[in-house]
Amino acid sequence: MNENDRELLEGLQALAGVGPREAPAHIEDRLRARFRKEKRRRNLFNWAPPLIAAACMAGIALLLGMRSEAPQPVAVPSAVVARVTAPAVDEDSDESFYPLPEAEALPAMENAMVVRVQLPVSSLQLMGVPVSEERADASVQADLLLGQDGLARAVRLAQ
Amino acid sequence: MVRRLAFVSVAAGLAAASLLAQGPHRGGGPGDFAFVRAEFGGSNKVVQGAPYSAQAVTQFTQTLANGDHIQRNTTASIARDSQGRMRTERSFGNIGALSATRGSGKNVMIFDPVASKSYVLEPESKVARSMPIPAARLANSSPHMPHDLASAKTEDLGTQVIQGVSAQGKRVTRAIPAGKEGNEKEIDIVTETWYSPDLQVVVMSKTSDPRFGESVYQLNAITRTEPDPALFTVPSDYAIKEGRPFRQGEARRGPAPAQ
């Protein structure tokens, strides 16, 4: 045992003589707080995937719900949309027409006709359909469903 | 709100489709249209044993914000025989608030449930477009639009003689509560209908919707004698062509034909 070893041994013996020592209380508190925080973070990561999946499913359900609440296409009187070639079972009505808001209060149709017209997009404004001003000068072909009074009940894009 | 969104979607579709349409609008201002073609002018309600002829007049009035008025009138000649065949002769110069940019789009439509045929006569070209009527489509049911009548109030107006015909009247008032459509005050939409049980037709109707305007429809000069049978046949100088119903995706390229 050389001189250095002896000094080290004496130091250790002195340290041992002081007895067991603990970290200061504030250090322990900080450590515990840190462990709790880390645990919460891990829990969050564990729950994140199912939470995200649930949110996505809820979003899809909401979109589907909105679609189902959209205005129901008008069932056009079957005689109006008679088709020449091999009528199919589902051809008794054409549900591609959308009701016009201005037709809400008009009397029920006794007979009907479909008129194909070429009209500026701005004309749809007069029918209560909001359109972009930028496209107001463009023209489009559309089918108008008219009642016995010659007033439009519904519209369908020809294109 | 959702309904409005749906209409915005339709409008967006129209705007997008317009990019593929026939180029810039030629002539006419906002609110105008060009008649292209009419299709199938009959009825799927077959009424037999109650012939009549009449002039149908529709007056549409829209009041603008500055107090000005837009007024459009349309007329049609209507005839129905004892067999339930119908003929409607109508000009499409106006459709509600819309006015044709050129021509009147005059058409004669014949609905013949006896022969299970319908015809659209085009006087300009002397062409009769024929389309069959499947028997299943001759059901004796009256088509009607799905009205939201949940909050509607209906009043019986009794019986009146209109144009020589006894008619039963009713008034339906539907209220749009304040705030529902961004409106400050309640909006009352009133529809008055006079229906003839004998003829099984509406002889007069009035609709007042402050959002869009007022319309009055009336059958004038009603006669209840048997119409001339020739009215329900295709004139001999017309060429009969098998017609095809309108379908989506079949818009014509180029400008609409002049009438």
Image (tube, coloured by chain):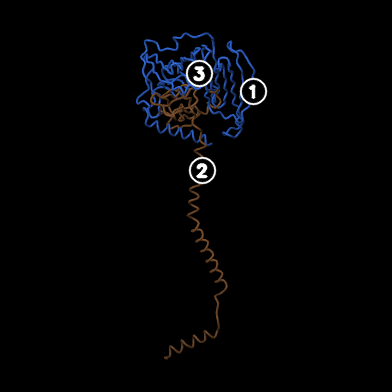
Q: Nearer the viewer, residue A100 or A147?
A: A147
Badge 3: chain ID: B
Q: Amino acid at mark 3?
A: Val
Decide if residue B242 is in sight here.
Answer: yes
Badge 1: chain ID: B
Counting other residues with Cα less than 10 Å from the Cα at mark 1, is it few (<14), some (14-19), or many (20 or more)? few
Q: For the residues tagged 2 and 3, is the chain the same?
A: no
Q: Which residue is mark 1?
A: B155
Question: At numbered mark 1, what does the secondary structure look like: helix, strand or loop?
Answer: strand
Q: Residue at x 35, y 25 (%)?
A: B254
Q: Nearer the viewer, residue A54 or A135?
A: A54
Decide if residue A139 is in sight here.
Answer: no
Q: Looking at the colours in the rendered structure, which chain would you say is drawn in brown?
A: A
Q: Which residue is mark 3?
A: B46
Q: Give how far apart the Cα atoms at labels 2 and 1 are.
A: 40 Å
Question: Where in the figure is residue B34, as x and y percent of width and height?
Answer: 41, 22
Q: Looking at the colours in the rendered structure, which chain would you say is drawn in blue?
A: B
Q: Which residue is mark 2?
A: A62
Q: Give how far apart the Cα atoms at labels 2 and 3 are.
A: 44 Å
Question: At numbered mark 3, what does the secondary structure look like: helix, strand or loop?
Answer: loop
